[in-house]
């Protein structure tokens, strides 16, 4: 998709939105003022995103924006079919990769650990993923180095979605505990992984 979007010309008046035009991605609209540290972290990451190059179509274009394990099928012969393109927008291709990596990290954290560490698991996944990805499209090392910040941005984006779907004042029990942990990770800049990108 990242390769094909470079030559894709949308029909007149049907172009997908840029990520900044997506209402659900508007963190400064949805994150509550009662969480000033979270809002500060969001603003820092949004300002950082503004420094990334958009002119080069080899790095920026139409992305799936929600490609995780529940949004594609793999057949017995290895063919991959992605679906659920409703969040598709213009963003950096590395962001699409960060989404996939984020889902790998979350899945690892939810399962019983079997010997390898999270960083070992990330290394194993990236080794295979990047070999396959780079057979079709190149990924400059600068985008790997940007991955920790993209993962933090993504975590904030998902936290932002929680605020859109739930009222913090009424949640209770396990969801409230998860929410508090989520906020604590954001406020303390806890890395999602210590894998040495780039």
Image (cartoon, rainbow, N blue to C red):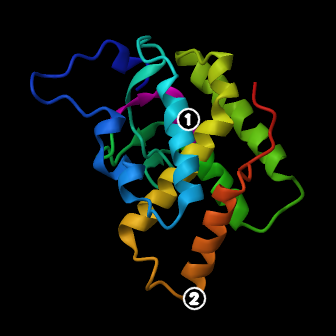
Determine whether 84 is above or below 19 in the image: below
Query: Where does label 1 land, which residue?
Result: 97
Distance between the Cα atoms at labels 2 and 1? 33 Å
The residue positioned 41% from the left and 30% from the top of the image is: 91
Above or below: residue 73 compared with residue 114: above
Q: Provide residue 41's location: percent of width, then percent of height.
A: 58, 48
Residue stretch in magenta: 89-98
Asked which quadrant contains residue 195, the reply is top right
Picture quadrant where residue 164 is located: bottom left
Q: Nearer the viewer, residue 138 or 46?
A: 46
Residue assigned mark 2: 173
Secondary structure of the residue carrying numbered label 1: helix
Q: Residues within 10 Å of mark 2 (few under 14, many from 20)?
A: few
Magenta stretch holds residue 6:
no
Task: Name the residue rendered at 62%, 23% in the picture.
Answer: 143
Precedes in sequence: disc 2 or disc 1: 1
Does the CB distance between marks 2 and 1 fall below 8 Å? no
The quarter of the picture where the C terminus appears is top right
Dominant secondary structure (helix, strand or loop) of the stretch shown in magenta: helix
In the rendered view, does 55 fall on the left or right side of 35? left
Instruction: Give whichever of 21, 2 is nearer the camera.
Output: 21
Q: Quadrant of the N terminus?
A: top left
Q: Position of residue 196 (x, y in %)?
A: 81, 33
Residue 77 seen from this side: no
Q: Residue furthest right?
A: 115
From the top left corner, tell me how far across and down residue 98 is, in percent: 57, 39
Residue at 55% x, 35% y is: 97
Q: Residue 15: tell me if it is visible.
A: yes
Q: Classify mark 2: helix, strand or loop.
A: helix
Q: In percent of the image, x 51 and y 53: which residue is there?
A: 39
User: Which mark is in front, 2 or 1?
Assistant: 2
């Amino acid at each position: 998709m990242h390769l094909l979007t470079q030559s894709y010309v949308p029909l007149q008046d049907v172009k997908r939105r840029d990520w900044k035009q997506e209402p659900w991605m508007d963190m400064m609209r949805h994150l509550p003022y009662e969480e000033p540290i979270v809002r500060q972290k969001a603003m820092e990451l949004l300002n950082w995103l503004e420094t990334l190059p958009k002119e080069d179509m080899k790095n920026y274009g139409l992305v799936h924006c929600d490609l995780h394990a529940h949004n594609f099928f793999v057949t017995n012969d290895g063919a991959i079919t992605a679906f659920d393109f409703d969040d598709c927008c213009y963003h950096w291709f590395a962001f699409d990769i960060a989404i996939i990596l984020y889902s790998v990290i979350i899945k690892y954290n939810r399962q019983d650990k079997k010997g390898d560490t999270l960083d070992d698991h990330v290394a194993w996944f990236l080794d295979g993923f990047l070999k396959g990805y780079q057979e079709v499209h190149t990924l400059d090392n600068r985008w790997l180095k940007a991955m920790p910040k993209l993962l933090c941005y993504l975590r904030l984006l998902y936290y932002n979605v929680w605020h859109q779907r739930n009222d913090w004042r009424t949640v209770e029990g396990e969801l409230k505990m998860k929410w508090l942990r989520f906020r604590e990770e954001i406020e303390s800049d806890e890395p999602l992984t210590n894998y040495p990108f780039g």
